[in-house]
Amino acid sequence: MKLISDLKHTSLLLGLSALLLVPIQGRAADVEDTGQQEAVQGLPLEELRMFAEVYGRIKDAYVEPVDDRELLQDAIRGMLAGLDPHSSYLEPDAFDSLQVHTSGEFGGLGIEVGMEDGFVRVIAPIDDTPAQRAGIKAGDLIIKIDDTPMQGLGLNDAVDMMRGEIGSEIRLTIVRDGVEKPFEVKLVRDAIKVVSVKPKLLEPGYGYVRITQFQLNTADDLRKALVDMSEETQLKGLVLDLRNNPGGVLQAAVDVVDTFIDKGLIVYTEGRLPSSQLEFSATAKTPEPDLPLVVLINGGSASASEIVAGALQDHHRAVLMGTDSFGKGSVQTVLPLGNDRGLKLTTARYFTPEGRSIQAQGIQPDLVVEEGRLTSVVHEDFIKERDLAGHLENAAAVEQVTNGDEELAQRDFQLYQAVNLLKALNIVSTGSQGG
């Protein structure tokens, strides 16, 4: 029995060695024998032998029989999982997931997730989804789905578990910074259709556009929203809200930046392959090159969101407000393997126009504004001129209505501060023009 086991190990090792040597021999057919020997010696033969031995031990001794195909599939998943949180092995269902993700319609809970220390970390909940309505926050760790612990489970498996029949219930056990104990959240799965661009007028002259994620049509929808708002009022400033935006299509991010700048580099990538050396620049045809702009970011702003924020910051085209972004500055490329399978492999890093790497650093806002709530301080009732008997009336006095500002400050303090900044920029600009 021992002899048979050793023979299987040796056979697998030889097979792996031959497989790995094929491209070396193919490239170096005219190289002398010494060069080929050096190439062979460069292979980690001891580690390959160990892999073959572990494979054989599992086949011989695991408590239940293991299918060879499934064991090798698991080995592939393990290789990719060991690289970084974003590289993964794509089976047919995962290919379908990528397609529906960029088109903007899919089923599930509405959470953008990644892996961290063996657990599923929420990058951002998507607006108007079960996750967002249940109060799931960027940075939450999902340690259990229903009764299944997440540690050791692959990201694709976790995503598959979160998807399911519309109307079915699911329980997530969450660990959150600042909360002493893990807690459970019950959600009901729903059909998720993400609206990428959500515009509105905050008040006359001041617009607001939230981009929930970057899809193929995001830039077109943004430009249409700007035209519609301009027809309703003369825009004096715009808040571009990228908070909790997990990213999306690279070209969409480039086109969004191109909406606001008319020249210069937007983003570039660097990797080992020639195809990973890319540059994207602005075009001269820019709809809004001068509109005052404040961009809101936070820890849930990732990837394409950081490209937009970093480019606008480097070009001094916008004031960034909020908190540090997520820090996902890597490029994933889908490499087909045949039979509807592929690798999602990290192949490059993003850099802002000034050469800053986003990876594990993120984008720092120009003005740090934490999430909070503005509350009024109760003052003593001082006697004022209008309280005096026989005071003179001011016929020109107009009652100021501030309820809208107070409501915004209560509901979204960061947005409230962004609007105030836009108003201040307009005052400064008007004063400068008046000379």
Image (spheres, rainbow, N blue to C red):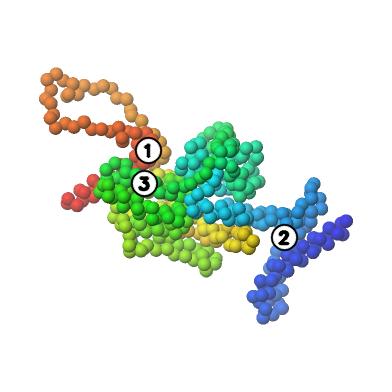
- Residue 373, picture quadrant: top left
Q: Amino acid at mark 2?
A: Glu
The residue indicated by pointer 2 is: 47
Q: Dividing the image into 4 quarters, which one contains the N terminus?
A: bottom right
- Amino acid type, callout 1: Phe
Report the mark closest to the observer, 1 or 3: 3
Relative to residue 309, is residue 112 drawn left or right? right
Circles 1 and 2: CB atoms closer than 8 Å: no
Asked whether 69 or 8 is in front, the reply is 69
Mark 2 element type:
helix
Mark 3–mark 2 Cα distance, whole angstroms, equals 56 Å
> Which numbered marker is on residue 199?
3
Place residue 286 in its image quadrant: bottom left
Which is closer to the viewer, label 1 or label 2?
1
Occupied quadrant, residue 201: top left
Instruction: Report crowding for label 3: few under 14, some 14 to 19, many 20 or more residues within 10 A (C-alpha).
Output: many
Decide which of tag 3 and tag 2 comes sooner along the chain. Answer: 2
CB of mark 3 within 8 Å of CB of mark 2? no
Q: Nearer the viewer, mark 3 or mark 2?
A: 3
| Mark 1, residue position | 413
Please give the name of the residue rendered at 41% of the width and 58% of the height, measured from the top-left corner. 254
Label 1 vs 3, first from the N-terminus: 3
Residue 324: x and y in percent read 44, 47
What percent of the width, then of the height, locates residue 137?
A: 50, 40
Residue plotted at (49% across, 53% down): 103
- Gap between marks 1 and 3 measured at Cα: 18 Å
In screen coordinates, is 405 left or right of 305?
Answer: left
Q: Is residue 44 above or below residue 88?
A: below
**Lateral position of residue 79 relative to residue 330, left or right:** right
